Structures are given as structure tokens and as C-alpha cells.
Image (cartoon, rainbow, N blue to C red):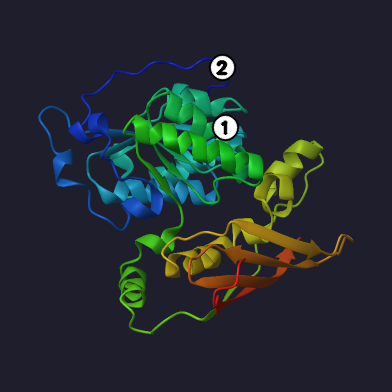
Amino acid sequence: MNSGSSTQIESTTRRDFLKAGTAVVGGSLLGSLALNARAYASGSDIIRIGLVGCGGRGTGAAEQALAADPNVHLVALGDTFADRVESAHDRLQHRSTADRIHVPAERRFAGFDAYKHVIAMCDVVLLCTPPHFRPAHLKAAIAAGKHVFAEKPVAVDAGGVRSVIETCQQAEAKRLSVVSGLCWRYDPGMRATFAQIHDGLVGDIVAMQTSYDTHGLWMHPRQSAWSDMEWQIRNWLYFTWLSGDFNVEQHVHSLDKTAWAMRDQYPVSCSGTADGRHAPVLSTGTSSTTWPSSTNTRTASRRSAAAVSKTAARSTSTITFMERRGAST
């Protein structure tokens, strides 16, 4: 385990698409789409990946990346906590792709700065930490010229979203790829369904209701040796500053489908109210959203239930579309 400065590893010849910015890689996307044919160039075909965030989702993303292409090699691991790094390494060693895991102790990093060392050692970095850290980690990866898989959500507040937008603009200018973890966008059946919606098979969309229901969520009981910070980061799902809340972290999948149905035309204004009291199990709220359009006024109302303990969670959005009939909005 390394918690200090990074150790340099021997560089391999990158594929042409790593130089040209045509990589499409990371977690669920690598697991469902074939790599671009132009990836196979002269010299070494090895793609070095590094994982930042070694929890269940991060380890799963590394497994999917390794399974997607035989030339993907995992070369670095990083997490805030050393035990998560070691558990991820042990889990990956028992997979069929273990022969492509090259992460000795000096390339396993723990601490808040672990991401810096992982980024320095790979061609593609998988960012799978709690969402609070995503904007800073993404900014560092793009600044270093690396392609990125960024697990959803990419931020937990407005400032983080603005940072990610700016960073993605920089990535585009550098011809670097940034792929999100909104996994339904890469599901063949879902893609075929939305293609038919966009072709008008169901007619004009006048209303939508979308729900996100999930079973009991994970929780790590507090240990006596943990500080408040460690306890919260290990249970990040239940702390808004780390997760963004249930709507941002979980229900985002369903909200993304409504945006997908509208051809990614996103709202320009939002308003909402919420119950400010602490609730032992659920907190609820309502909000409304308006989309821009030359022909329609579109409003959405949402009532959500955000889990704050190990219990089932549900969130529902209802979206209605009305003819503008010449009225201003």
C-alpha cells in the first residue's frame, strides 16, 4: 500500500485512439459496446486503466472494463481507505481477468490524494468515489490528458455541475473522452425503445410519470475507531453533501430517461419546496420544472422519498406537456 508519492511505471505504446481522443471506455459502457476498430494500431495495444474509488461499484466497473477488451490492463488502484483498496484488489484477483491485473503494493494508494497518483499512471481513469469528489477528480484527470469514465452522478450541487460542464468543454477541446455511468443509455433494448419513441411510434409526448423504486440499501455500522468524517464517507449514500440525496444519486436514472425521451432538452428553471424537519426514515418534497420550447410549455411536478436509513426508497416524477397556444412563458 502506498500513501505517499507515486511510483512511475514503464510506459506502453498507446493506441491511436488514445492519442486522437476516440476512446469509448469505462464501466458499463465497456461492458456493452465494442471498441472502435481504429483502436487497433501498430505497436502495443495495451490500454492502462486506473480505478479511483474501490467500493462495490468501482470494483464492478473495473471488472467490466477488463472483460470488455483483452488488451485492457489494470495498473493502479486508489481509495480514501486502505482496506477498500485491498479488498478490491483481492476480489479482482479471483476473476478470469486476473492475469491482466498488474497492481503491486507500490501502485495501490490510500488517502484523499490517492486519485492524483492513480491518474498519473494510466491512460483511462475510472472515477467511482462518492459523488462529492467527482468534479475535482474529473478536473485533475482532464488536466493530465486522460480519458475518463465518471460514475453517475457527476456532482452533488450547482457549483459542482458548473465545474463539470467547464471540464467537459476542456476535454472536448483536447479530444479526450468523458463517459458517464448513466447505464441505461448503453442498454441495447433501451436504445431501441427510445429510437422508436423518437421516430414517433407513440405519437406526441403529452405527459410522463417516472418512478425509481429500490430494495433495501447498504449501510456500514459505525465502528468505535472511526471519526465522524470516516463514518460519513463510508456511508456516503446517506449524507447529502456526499451523495446529493436520493434524487441525485438514484432517481437520476429515471430522470435521465425523461430527458432522453425529450431528446436531451433540459430544463432552464426549477422551483421546489421541502420538509425541512429531520425524519427518521424518509424526507419528502415537491418541485416543479420548466422546459423551453417554441411550441410547448412543459412543467414537471415531483414528489420524492429519500432514504436516510437502510430501508427501501422510492422517488416519482410526473411531467405534463401543454400547448403554448401563443402565450408567453
The amino acid on which the numbered mark 1 sits, given as a three-letter code, is: Ala
Neighbours of disc 1 within 10 Å: few (<14), some (14-19), many (20+): some
Residue 100 found in image quarter: top left
Q: Is residue 319 above or below residue 175?
A: below
Q: Is residue 243 above or below residue 170?
A: below
Give the residue displayed 14% in from the left and 46% down from the top.
37
Q: Position of residue 53 (x, y in %)?
A: 53, 40
Question: Would residue 223 be found to the left or right of residue 63 on screen?
Answer: right
Residue pointed to by mark 1: 136
Residue 1 percent location from the top left of the image: 53, 25
Q: Is residue 117 visible?
A: yes
> Is residue 141 left or right of 307 when viewed as pictured?
left
Comparing 283 with 100, the one in front is 283
Category of crowding for the residue at label 2, using alpha-carbon neighbours closer than 10 angstroms: few (below 14), some (14–19), many (at least 20): few
- 126 in relation to 219, above or below: above
- Quadrant hosting residue 217: bottom right
Mark 1 or mark 2: name the one nearer the start of the chain: 2
- Residue that label 2 marks: 4
